[in-house]
Image (cartoon, helix red, strand yellow):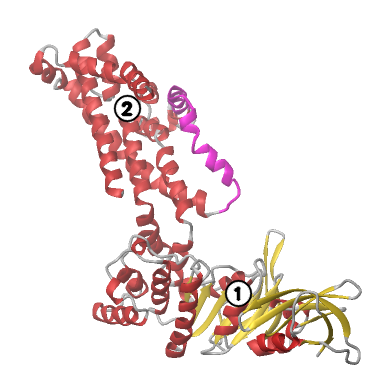
Amino acid sequence: MAIEVRHVSKLFGDFQALDEVSVDVASGSLTALLGPSGSGKSTLLRVIAGLEQPDAGEVYISGREATTVSPQKRGVGFVFQHYAAFKHMTVWNNVAFGLKIRKRPKAEIEQRVSELLDLVQLSGLAERYPAQLSGGQRQRMALARALAVDPNVLLLDEPFGALDARVRKELRAWLRRLHDEVHVTTIFVTHDQEEAMELADQIVLMNQGKVEQIGGARDLYEQPANDFVMSFIGPVSNFGEELVRPHDIVVRREQNGSAERATVERVVHLGFEVRADLELEDGREVWVQMTRDEATALDLKEGVQVFVAKQ
Amino acid sequence: MLRLVALGYLAALLIVPVGLVVYRAFEDGIGAFIESITTPEALHALWLTIVIALIAVPMNTVFGIFCALAIVRRKFPGHGLVNSVVDLPLALSPVVVGLALVLVYGRQGWWGGWLIDNGFQVIFALPGMVLATIFVSLPFVVREVVPVLREIGDEQEEASATLGASPWQTFWRVTLPAIRWGVLYGVVLTTARALGEFGAVSVVSGRIAGRTETMTLHVEERYQAFEIQDAYAASVVLAVLAVATLLVMTLLRREET
């Protein structure tokens, strides 16, 4: 295990940011800490980096106890949501910072920095200052800076949170490719379930300072441990007393067994996907999801009578 | 209209009086002016003023930076108290500061007697004047640096730490360059205050011409002695120092943007 977190708790005043959290992260994996704001995911990342001291519990990095080791000596690379670029330094000097601190030979620094700038596609901008870069470029610079010192683990705190949707998507795909190339154990924090599912080998889903479930994207989607996991990962619909995936509700035009009668209230066409709001006979509302072809076959439109059942 | 009012106000309060001082200083020709400012007393006063500033400004700069760091970056008991006490010299009349120093360091003071017996005179000597100047010019660097530190936040410092830098390396390579303009403004303001201080220094100096007289005290002494021409000439020297300080500040501002 590259990182082991054991029973870590952290209080801020009387706010329980982390409550007995334990997480394992395998070497070379890409792990997402996912959860709503205030769930403790950023605090956990900062505890791993040594930027925050836990009140209880231990952190092991590459098998060694690191709980009280200062961030300076942990050998972690940290990337901040707002880049934390050194504004008074050029891109080149930002990336070279950690190597200069380690007093590496000049030739080695030159070579390593130009390699990294190539890797993050900023070679032409080495002499620019952070203020002259776009948000996406700044974040790539911050990534190169963190990678320069060959960290044992790379920690990213909402790395794409401050970027617009298009750049975000590009950087996401790019980070995945980068991880496949560099293979450094990586943990990133996000509140975006799609981002976590698209990028991560393992998702740690957190809520109110606790870990709700750890697993792959499919596990969390198909075998959610509880209602919170189910409603956080993917869409849900209230059907009867329980939560169901809206695509797990079967809609027919004819009565079939125990199916309930419902009236179509509204139909929304989202290209391939079609969503419909239905009202059951007792007044409860339920929404369903189906493909465009299914909707066409049912001739689904406002006012139509249908029969619904859980798959 | 608004511009006229502002200009008129400034003219009545600042430009005309200062202009008149300059005019009077040169009324009897440049020779008389030079004669006035090259008397042994005047030269000594100028030298003493500069010496005091050269000691007080660096000390307040170093203290100011660390005090600002403590206020912004550390949460410690009595945090709020430090924050308000730093402003005390701005609120307190300099005369009171001078008297307070006499009470502590004078012959009858708490430590003064002991210090004098051991051959170290504070009051009526250079150390007392430096202390008074440090006291009255203490808040400027702190007040300039605190908002800059708040604005830059601590992420750059955290990034530096995760990249392997020690706190000291982080201070020199990340924090200090990031706050350098705030520090420079603070230094300029501190310098201006140190050069122009009158009240506190007046109380602790004893005002011995040629020995413990700074430029401002010299102006006052010449004025009281009805040597108006000397007073005007010395005032012009002070004004030139002030303008030079402001000029440095303006140039720095331009550099920054």
Q: Quadrant of residue A2?
A: bottom right
The answer to whether residue A173 is magenta is: no
Name the quadrant of the N terminus of chain A: bottom right
Q: Camera-side residue: A60 or A19?
A: A19
Q: Nearer the viewer, mark 1 or mark 2?
A: 1
Q: Residue at x 46, y 81 (%)?
A: A175
Task: Check disc 2 and report the residue beneath it.
Answer: B196
Disc 1, SS: loop
Which residue range is magenta in the image?
A: B75-103
In the image, taking residue A135 as reference, residue A109 lies left or right, namely: left
**Subunit ID for the residue under disc 1:** A
Q: Position of residue B87 (x, y in %)?
A: 49, 36
Dot 2 amino acid type = Gly
Instruction: State how far apart marks 1 and 2 are (Cα).
Output: 59 Å
Which residue in the rendered view is the most extreme toward the left?
Answer: B31
Disc 2, SS: helix
Task: Check disc 1 and report the residue beneath it.
Answer: A192
Please, what is the dominant secondary structure of the magenta stretch?
Answer: helix
Q: Position of residue B17 (x, y in %)?
A: 28, 16
